[in-house]
Image (cartoon, grey):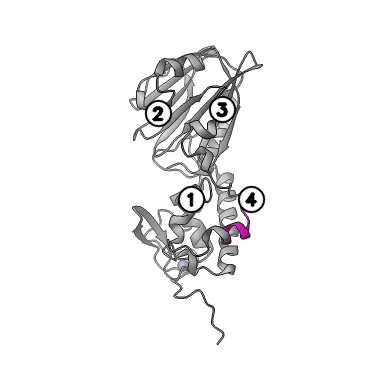
Amino acid sequence: MPELPEVETVRLGLNAVTCHLPIVGTEVLLARTITYPKVLAEFQAGLQGVQIAEWRRRGKYLLATLNKDGLQPAGWLGVHLRMSGQLLWVEASEPLHKHTRVRLSFEKNQELRFLDQRTFGQLWWVPPSEDPNYIMSGFGALGPEPLSPELSDEYLEKVLRGRDRPIKNALLDQTLIAGLGNIYVDESLFLSGIHPTQPCKRLTVSQIKKLHGAIEEVIQTALTQGGTTFSSFRQVSGTNGNYGGVAWVYRRGGQPCHQCNTPIEKMRLGGRSCHFCPQCQPVLKDKIETVP
Ligand SMILES: [Zn+2]
């Protein structure tokens, strides 16, 4: 599933190629991809003749600001890639891939195609009279961005304090921190030496500080690498990211830990796969650090 670094990589690609060109047609090949408006004709009419001013990102959501003739506000186009969504910028003559769900035709025979094998991906057209925070489910409830000042040590302590749930599950919660997913949570927990099943309430203040630093480091590194290569992720140009080559634990089950040579273990937690080093990420029994 594309996470913050992959979505940010897509955003940069979209900003480089899709802006300030009028959309001349919209074809929806799978109706349920369009979450809003419910009437497909309204989605198509909303996008007809408009231009994308710029793409922004919040968490794993993409949001294009639209206008007409470069002036008149024309609402927003929202995109969530979910499990396997891809946005590809192609020549209109490019043969259709079987997982193509939506085609946006631009002037100069260019197309932005939304491909989605698993079909959980979502597109919204939000009219200028509405607010994306209310129309796009989950968008208005997102927690702070991992690299923003709002995500401080104090904030993390506050939202994790007293919680029974495993730290891995808390970090996947988009209302606590926006944009993290399975890959970068596992990587951040490795770098901070925290076992994924550790209950939040058993984390020490120093562990939380370390975790915060690890999240920043992992996200920065992944952004530099253009995200992680996996089966469903492609940049708008169709190429892949490189983070997989520098990962600590992601998809390294059974391989030696880069720090201690212990084989990386894989387990299931809350329905998700989890990779960790049992040596570098010990389970702590108690929050109280005893003095010898
Ligand atoms: Zn290790």
Q: Is residue 154 magenta?
A: yes
Residue 157 lies, in percent from the top left, at: 57, 62
User: Reading the chain from its start, which is encountered first: label 2 or label 3?
Assistant: 3
Crowdedness near tag 2: few (<14), some (14–19) or many (≥20) residues, C-alpha within 10 Å: many
> Quick check: marks 3 and 1 in contact, CB under 8 Å?
no
| Residue at mark 3 to residue at mark 1: CA–CA distance | 31 Å
- Could you say whether the residue bearing mark 1 is in a helix, strand or loop? helix
Residue named by callout 3:
64
Report the disc number at residue 245.
Answer: 1
Residue named by callout 2:
115
User: Reading the chain from its start, which is encountered first: label 1 or label 4?
Assistant: 4
Q: Does the magenta stretch include residue 64?
A: no
Crowdedness near tag 3: few (<14), some (14–19) or many (≥20) residues, C-alpha within 10 Å: many
Q: Of tags 4 and 3, which is closer to the observer?
A: 4
Residue type, mark 4 in image: Glu
Residue type, mark 2 in image: Leu
Residue named by callout 4:
150
In the image shown, does 76 or 101 lie closer to the viewer? 76
> Quick check: marks 1 and 2 in contact, CB under 8 Å?
no
